[in-house]
Structure formats: structure tokens, C-alpha cells
Amino acid sequence: MKIICIGRNYSEHAKELGNAIPEQPVIFMKPDTALLKGNDFYLPEFSNDIHYELEVVVKISKPGKYIQKESAHKYYEEIGLGIDFTARDLQAALKSKGLPWELAKGFDGSAVVSEFFNKESYNLSALEFTLEKNKKAVQQGNTKDMLFSVDDIIAFVSQYFTLKKGDIIFTGTPKGVGKVSENDILEGYLENQKVLDLRIL
Ligand code: ZN
């Protein structure tokens, strides 16, 4: 499976990192080895500035290529929450040289994914999600603020990459990204339901 991620999909987050609002989706990928197993995230030694990015994730349910936006909803049945851990110091160094972000975004454990839930139970076009760090809300997003909807994203990426069953799409983070430190507890909520519970070590 592959993990496709969307950057700068919330204008307030693009602004907080000093980036322009994109005219088409910004895409990057993580390898399948990035998936975190369990609830413990170990801070890697190569970074002093690991950031959380809370994102709604969707799981592709059947293969497709050149999917039209109008039929994109048929290609996913389940959604969840994820954290796109980012080595912000490494990313800034790579960005300044115009180099790809993989080292900063695709390292082991950098893709955290909750359990998946049937999308019919949610209104994906106005879905609230919240991240608490040590019991204090640090990110509050609503998918209505996405620049590119899930269906836009699927139509766009499937022009380039054949989507396969089990692929996961991280749909971008709202504003409020920040650093994690040893012993932090991260808890993610989809609407009012806690679906992520993570310990930083
Ligand atoms: Zn992200």
C-alpha cells in the first residue's frame, strides 16, 4: 500500500508556515514502513523539531485510475484520523535548497493512523476534528475549510498514480501545528470521539 499526503490544504496552515495558497494540490508520499505500530512514538535522533499535523485520512476501497470527481466517492468507504509527523527542521533545510521532503516526512513511525470508520456515519464535508496535547486543544479543524475536497484529491492524484485498495490519503492539516517533546500525550478526536491516543518517548 502507499500513503499519499496533501500539503497546504488549509489556507490558515499554509500561511502559518509562510507558504503561498496552492493552485493545485501539493502531493508527497510516505513509504508503508512509515506506519506507526502501537501507541508509542519514539522521537528520532536526526531531528530536534518533530511536529504533529492532525489530518483526516481516507482509505481507498477499490483500484482506480483517471477517476472523475463525480465518481470519486465510490472509491472510499472508510475514514479515520491520522498524524503526519514532520521533522520541521529537516524539512526547512530541504525546502530552502529546493530538495524533496521525504527524509523529513517519510521516516519510520511518521504516519499515525487511527481505526477506520464507515464514512456514512459522518458528514465528510463538515467534519470537526481536534488534537489535544497534554489535555489542551492545540489543533481544531473542520474539513469544510479544505482547499481541495477528498473527491478533488482523488480525481487529481489518480491521474498520476493508480490507486489501489488499502492505500491511505492524508488530506492535510489545519493551523496549529507544533512541536512534540518527550512524555507528551497526544489525543485525537473525530467529532467528539477519541480515536487517537499517543505517547511521545
Ligand atoms: Zn501534513
Image (spheres, rainbow, N blue to C red):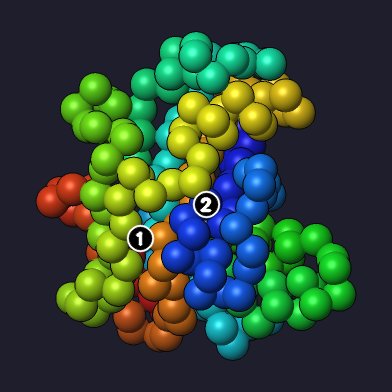
Residue in front for this viewpoint, 156 or 161: 156
The percent coordinates of residue 114 (x first, y second) are: 34, 46
Residue count near mark 1 (Cα–Cα under 10 Å), binned few <14, some 14–19, many ≥20 = some
Identify the image quadrant of the N terminus. Answer: top right
Figure check: 192 above or below 131: above
Q: Quadrant of residue 109?
A: bottom right
- Which mark sits nearer the N-terminus, 1 or 2? 2
The percent coordinates of residue 176 (x first, y second) are: 39, 72
The percent coordinates of residue 161 (x first, y second) are: 72, 28
The answer to whether the residue labelled 1 contacts the one labelled 2, judged by CB atoms less than 8 Å apart, is no
Q: Residue at x 22, y 54 (%)?
A: 189
Tag of residue 39: 1
Tag of residue 54: none
Q: Residue at x 77, y 71 (%)?
A: 95
Figure check: 165 above or below 184: above
Q: Residue at x 55, y 65 (%)?
A: 14
Q: Amino acid at mark 2?
A: Asn
Quick one: SS at disc 2?
Answer: loop
Q: Is residue 56 visible?
A: yes
Q: Residue at x 41, y 60 (%)?
A: 174
Residue count near mark 2 (Cα–Cα under 10 Å), binned few <14, some 14–19, many ≥20 = many
Q: Amino acid at mark 1?
A: Asn
Quick one: SS at disc 1?
Answer: loop
Tag of residue 9: 2
